[in-house]
Amino acid sequence: MTTRNDQTTLWEMAAAAAVVGAFGWWALNWGMDGAVHNRRTQTLPDLKGRSLSAALDLLAPLNIGLRKAGVEFNAAVPIASVLRQDPGAGTVVREGKIVRVVVSEGGRTVLAPAVVGLPLRNAEMMLRQAQLLLGEVGTQYSLKAEKGLVLAQDPKSETSVEKNATVNLVVSGGAPPAGVTLMPDFSRKTLSSVHAWAAGAGLQVAVQTDESSPFPGGTVLTQTPAPDSALASDAKVTVLVSGRRGAAPDAGEKIFHYELSQGGSDSQVRIVMVDKYGERELFNGLRKPGAKIDVPVQAAGGGHVKIYVNGVLVEEREL
C-alpha cells in the first residue's frame, strides 16, 4: 500500500525531472541560437545564367552551400546554367545557408525537314508538322527546277534548331527571261558540252584537271559558278575535269533504279548522288504510287545515293 508520504515523494521527483528537462531544453536552444548567431552574415550573389561550377565558385568563399532543386526547358538560358535561385540575389543570410537553384535544360529542339524540291505549299506544311515556321521566301530563276519548287533552305535539312524557329526558303521562278543568262549544270557531262555552251553565250572557260579522278577523261567534276547562278557578260567560268587517260573499267555509266510503294497519293521524289566531289541531283519530280524511276549515274570511285520522298530522307544506297 502506498502511503501519503510516498505519493508526495513521487510528485517531488516528477517535478524535479520536469525542471531539469526544461532547463536542458533551454540550454540546448540557447547554445544553438548562440552558435547560429555567431556565424557571419553574407549577401547572396546573382547566380542566374552561371554554370553550376561557376555558382559553386562564387558561394564557396562565403561558406554557403548549393543544391540543385530541379530543371526546366528555357531557350533564353544556356543549358546546365542557373535559371533561378532561392533565396534570391541580394538576400542577406548567415554562413551555412543552402541556396536552391533550378537549372536550365536549354530550349526544345527539332530537326529541320528536307523541303528542297517540294512545292512551296507542301514545304510550308512540312515545316508546320515539324513545329517550325516559314520565314522569308525568295525567288530565283532556274534551269533545273520548275516554277514554284523550293531550291534552297536555311537552316539546311537535318539541322537541329529551336522549336518555332523560322526557316527561310528560295523558290524557283522558272526559266529566266530574255537577257538573263544562267549557269547550266554540267556535273558529269563532257568538257565539249561546256565549250559548246560557252561559245554560244560568248564566255571564256578556264579548265583545271584532276589526274587522280576515276571518271573518264574530260568528265566535268565541279564548276564555278554553281548551277543556276546569274552570269554577267564578263563572267569567269571555271570547270574541274577528270584528267584520267584511257578508259576506266569501273567508270561506265550505270542505271540507278527506284520504285515507289503502292497506295497513297502522288509523291515528290528527289534522288541525290553524293561522292567526293559533292552532291548532285539525279532526279526531281512528281510520281504516282508504284512508279519506277531509272536514272543514269556514273559511279566511279564509289559514293552513295540519297532518296527523298516528299522531303523526307527514306533511303540511302551505296554504289
Image (cartoon, rainbow, N blue to C red):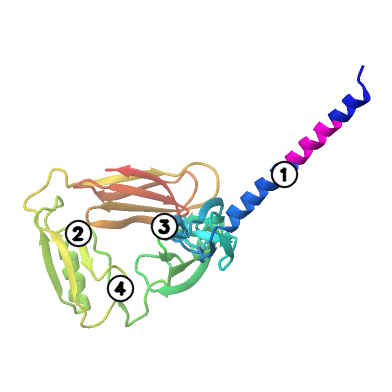
* First in sequence: mark 4 vs mark 1: 1
Q: Residue furthest front?
A: 5
Mark 3 and mark 1: Cα distance apart in space: 71 Å
Mark 1 and mark 2: Cα distance apart in space: 95 Å
Q: Secondary structure at mark 4?
A: loop
* First in sequence: mark 2 vs mark 3: 3
Q: Quadrant of residue 229?
A: bottom left
- Tell me if label 4 and label 1 are in contact, CB under 8 Å: no
Q: What x and y, as percent, mark residue 147? A: 44, 69
Give the residues in magenta.
11-21
Q: Secondary structure at mark 2?
A: strand
- Quarter holding the N terminus is top right
291 magenta-colored: no
Q: Secondary structure at mark 1?
A: helix
Point out which mark residue 165 bears: none
User: Which label lies toward us, 3 or 4?
Assistant: 3
User: Which label lies toward us, 1 or 2?
Assistant: 1
Mark 2 and mark 4: Cα distance apart in space: 17 Å
Q: Which residue is mark 4?
A: 229
